[in-house]
Image (cartoon, grey):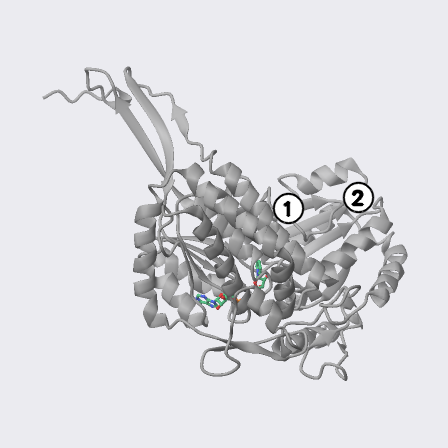
């Protein structure tokens, strides 16, 4: 493949060899070039630069900070086609999803621009006469964004757009598997800064490419009060302890094990379409991918043959080509992990359809697979584990209570959904005794969230929230201030302390 035009339009001129991070495309395994890396030992200096940027940026009025994000949104609109294609090339998702990811970046910029005039505090009634009490939100400091390979650009933008309007500079450590898209975003951001004017300090965004050691150095830095980390639960477990040790704040977006309950009254036509998109889309490599299908025993026989027929019709192939719905797994390790999970599922009594390697003749160095459906006799350990590949485990239930208990009986708590036309079932699923996930949908699959809502999940998913609603509060510090405009000095709770 020859992609030099695309790379140069995005401002990326890369040496073919040399030292650094070698980037390969999961589409065909070909090299895309070598990217310079940051050494972990450089992180203290980088954090100090970011801190200096913070000291200037926090004094720029929030609506003016919003103007920078508005310009970033404009630059992203102009670069959408190219950046979307680069996401496909470097990560392997189909172009429609690559473009969707860039659209999500544009959407969060729009959201953040509005937010820049709405970082509302509170006025609070004081119990003392002649006193006024208020709560104000102030910028917090440099925000580290550690991101995963599967959403190489959108996750950065959810964090960066909010952090920037909140007055925080960003240090971004992208996945070592997707450094190019990060560099492209940095170039796009630089264009926005050039148009913005001189009140943008240097170093508002610093991209640090490299491996886990670079992430670890960022996590350890006392100059970085916020660490927003997206990735595996293993990573989150390490990061959360390190950040907590120094009393920093972490925003964790970790693994999911998302389920759909298909109830007896479900619209099966809609359910099949939702299952296929959310279980095989992005080749099963979304944190919100549908991994468990919990089907009522009375509809199982009507649903499964339709689902298998739909799976058989899904086109697997080069994600850059129109009409393809399923691209490759990211690498050989992902393929091997998938095969191990399928072997274990079989050993547990599961019946597997699909799951084999595909297109090996055409793409010897890439890892295409047929998405798998696995009918399980029970929710065994392998079902409770997130395997980052297109495996859909099918379980059967008789009562809604049993279905909800199955849905909740996994360590992760990201996304969930129910297909039903029975309002009692739908509301029970959404109630306090229903789904225990951060995201719970009715008649919509578990993946493909809009940016307006808070995104994230509970338990081993980490508890963080990003994107919409009031997620912005995680990027600011809260200050409670009481002003005495009287000539007396009354104490709270009526305490007398005369001197
Ligand atoms: P990963 O955990 O291997 O890597 C994620 C990032 O963390 C990378 O940048 C990596 O270099 C860095 N990292 C790894 N160990 C670190 C450490 N000890 N300290 C600091 N940084 C460290 O994850 P991945 O394979 O890139 O992504 C797939 C995983 O991400 C899946 O589990 C998926 O569910 C999850 N994910 C979650 C969300 C969400 O919003 N909940 C979104 C996307 C992906």
Camera-side residue of 175 and 86: 86
Is residue 414 in sight in this rendering? no
Image location of residue 91, percent across then percent down: 62, 68
First in residue order: circle 1 vs circle 2: 2
Residue hosting label 1: 450
**Quadrant for the C terminus in the image:** top left
**Quadrant for the N terminus in the image:** bottom right
Is residue 399 in sight in this rendering? yes
Q: Is residue 391 left or right of residue 168?
A: right
Camera-side residue of 239 and 310: 310
- Secondary element at tag 2: loop
Is the CB atom of the residue marked by disc 1 within 8 angstroms of ligand 1's nearest atom?
A: no
Residue hosting label 2: 420
Image location of residue 130, percent across then percent down: 27, 16
Image location of residue 426, percent across then percent down: 74, 40
Residue appearing at x 64%, y 74% in the figure: 26
Q: Is residue 163 above or below residue 257?
A: above
Residue appearing at x 62%, y 64% in the figure: 87
- Give the foreground label among 1 and 2: 1
Q: Is residue 50 above or below residue 486?
A: below
Q: Is residue 124 above or below residue 313?
A: above
Q: Within 10 angstroms of label 2, few (less than 14), some, or many (20 or more) residues? A: many
- Secondary element at tag 1: loop
Residue appearing at x 80%, y 38% in the figure: 422
Q: Is residue 237 left or right of residue 282?
A: left
Image location of residue 258, percent across then percent down: 66, 56
Q: How many marks?
A: 2
Give the distance between the C-alpha atoms of the residues marked 1 and 2, in whole angstroms.
22 Å
Q: Which image quadrant for residue 4?
A: bottom right
Question: Quick one: which residue is furthest to the left in this view?
Answer: 499
Q: Which mark is residue 116?
A: none
Is the CB atom of the residue marked by disc 2 within 8 angstroms of ligand 1's nearest atom?
A: no
């Amino acid at each position: 493949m020859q992609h030099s035009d695309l790379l140069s339009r995005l401002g990326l001129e890369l040496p073919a060899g040399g030292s650094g991070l070698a980037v390969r495309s999961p589409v065909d395994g070909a090299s895309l070039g070598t990217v310079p890396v940051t050494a972990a030992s450089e992180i203290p200096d980088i954090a100090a630069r970011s801190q200096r940027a913070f000291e200037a940026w926090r004094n720029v009025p929030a609506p003016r900070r919003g103007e920078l994000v508005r310009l970033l949104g404009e630059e992203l609109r102009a670069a959408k086609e190219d950046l979307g294609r680069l996401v496909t090339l470097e990560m392997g998702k189909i172009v429609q999803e690559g473009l969707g990811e860039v659209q999500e970046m544009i959407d969060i910029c729009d959201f953040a621009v509005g937010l820049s005039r709405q970082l509302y505090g509170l006025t609070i009634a004081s119990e003392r006469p002649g006193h006024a009490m208020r709560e104000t939100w102030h910028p917090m400091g440099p925000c580290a964004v550690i991101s995963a390979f599967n959403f190489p650009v959108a996750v950065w933008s959810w964090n960066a757009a909010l952090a920037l309007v909140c007055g925080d500079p960003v240090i971004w450590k992208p996945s070592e598997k997707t450094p190019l898209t990060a560099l492209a975003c940095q170039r796009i951001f630089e264009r926005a800064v050039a148009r913005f004017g001189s009140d943008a300090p240097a170093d508002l965004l610093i991209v640090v490419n490299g491996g886990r050691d670079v992430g670890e150095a960022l996590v350890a830095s006392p100059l970085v009060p916020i660490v927003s980390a997206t990735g595996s639960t293993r990573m989150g477990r390490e990061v959360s302890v390190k950040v907590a040790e120094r009393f920093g704040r972490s925003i964790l977006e970790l693994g999911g094990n998302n389920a759909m309950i298909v109830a007896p009254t479900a619209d099966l036509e809609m359910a099949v379409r939702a299952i296929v998109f959310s279980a095989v889309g992005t080749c099963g490599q979304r944190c919100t991918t549908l991994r468990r299908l919990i089907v009522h025993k009375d509809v199982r026989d009507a649903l499964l043959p339709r689902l298998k027929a739909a799976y058989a019709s899904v086109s697997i192939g080069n994600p850059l080509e129109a009409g393809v719905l399923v691209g490759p797994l990211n690498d050989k390790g992902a393929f091997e992990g998938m095969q191990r999970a399928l072997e274990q599922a079989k050993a547990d009594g599961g019946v597997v359809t699909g799951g084999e390697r595909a297109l090996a003749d055409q793409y010897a160095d890439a890892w295409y697979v047929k998405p798998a459906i696995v009918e399980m006799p029970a929710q065994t350990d392998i079902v409770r584990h997130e395997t980052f590949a297109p495996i859909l485990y099918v379980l059967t239930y008789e009562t809604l209570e049993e279905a909800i208990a199955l849905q909740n009986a996994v360590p992760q708590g990201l996304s969930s959904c129910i297909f039903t036309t029975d309002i009692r079932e739908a509301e029970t699923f959404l109630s306090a005794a229903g789904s225990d996930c951060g995201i719970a949908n009715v008649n919509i699959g578990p993946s493909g969230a809009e940016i307006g809502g808070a995104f994230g999940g509970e338990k081993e998913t980490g508890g963080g929230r990003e994107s919409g609603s009031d997620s912005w509060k995680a990027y600011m510090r809260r200050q409670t201030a009481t002003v005495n405009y009287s000539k007396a000095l009354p104490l709270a709770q009526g305490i007398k302390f005369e001197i």
